[in-house]
Image (cartoon, helix red, strand yellow):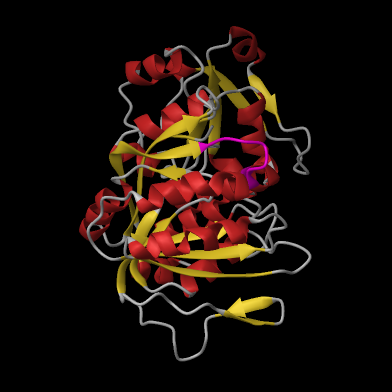
Amino acid sequence: MNPPKRLRSTGDEEEPPTGEKEEWGAVDVSIVMPMYNASCWLDECLQAILHQDYTGTMELSVFDDASTDDSRTVVEGWKERLEERGVSVVISGHNSSQPRGVGYAKNKAVSQSCGQYLCFQDADDVMLPQRVGLQYDASVLHPHSLIGCQVQRVPEGSTERYTRWINMISQDQLLTQVYTSHGPTVVMPTWFCSRNWYLKVGPFDEGGKGVPEDLIFFYQSLRQGGGMARVDQCLLVYRYHEKATTHSVTEETIWKLRVDFLQERVLSQWESFTIWNAGKQGRKLYRSLSPTNQKKVKAFCDVDENKIQKGFYTYEDSEQRPKPKVPVLHYKDASAPFIVCVKLDMTGGALEENLNSLQLKEGTDYYHFN
């Protein structure tokens, strides 16, 4: 394979030369890598791409989102080694005064690539040798799905509950737990999908800093009837650090997206339901619902006798007169379906035992929201 020609510069942004862009499907897999000030992680990241055991054709498509370090130079230094291994390399970017955001950079990296399948790779993470091969096989079997994998979090012990959730939830829970504060059940740094599916669902939201482009795309994929699958093998070293773009997204932004999606997908199908948690999180969910869905809340339920003894929750901020009063019951006296607003994996198994004691089925009788 001839190495692609260097992309030429037009203004502050580079575009593939006209007439020279290869047709889609010219390679099997494009590794899609947005990049912003990732210099210190790139050698490890690119070395891992070099060591993939996948035997099909691959390319690396990098879009540099106005890095101010030497990220671009580092990638260009790896170009020859990658191409000797048969991995073609496409590098472009812009040098505006500000980055335009992860969504923009991902879309650009995809649009300049030509693989039939897309393997999304963050510049600060490290793929294990079998990643592309195993996820490619899964994606061929599930062309309308986002394919993920298990991860190893570094530093070890950071985000312990979150990492356990990524790796341990069941295939069914990949679909039922899409409303929790953890975000996409198949986490973005592990995504692999067909180009056709990306084109149907995407592109990524380009709102920039503070926009959870992965969650928006994830929900849109579900709206389009897409599935999810996880390769149950650790195929990615997923790095946690303070510079990660995740930290720029506020909890309130995510909360609103989750509530809207819950109302659209679940509550619109239910005539009435119970909120499991009469505390802060349960009451916040109630206040966030549309007036139509607030009327469907027949009760809060809890295990805390102090909350239960109060008998009611009064929605003081309501403009309705009289103000709505919602009963507070012991969970054994409440009736399904439930929206569970208790944090997962934080009650030493008590919540799970209580749900099991009522013989409830997740995804039918209850959904987790927290």
Q: Is residue 63 magenta?
A: no
Is residue 169 shown above or below 88? above
Query: How many numbered circles does the render carry?
Result: 0
Q: What residue occupies the far bottom of the structure in this picture?
A: 19
Residue in the picture at 61% in, 50% down:
38
Q: Which residues are magenta?
A: 239-246
Residue in the picture at 60% in, 29% down:
282
Q: Position of residue 240 (x, y in %)?
A: 57, 35
Q: Looking at the image, can residue 266 be seen?
A: no
Q: What residue occupies the far top of the structure in this picture?
A: 305
Say whether residue 134 is left or right of residue 272: left
Q: Looking at the image, can residue 243 be seen?
A: yes
Say whether residue 97 is left or right of residue 287: right
Is residue 48 shown above or below 345? below
Q: Position of residue 201 (x, y in %)?
A: 44, 66
Viewport quadrant of the N terminus:
bottom left
Q: Of residues 169 and 93, which is closer to you in this image?
A: 93
Q: Position of residue 345 (x, y in %)?
A: 47, 21
Q: Main secondary structure of the magenta part?
A: loop
Q: Position of residue 154 (x, y in %)?
A: 51, 30
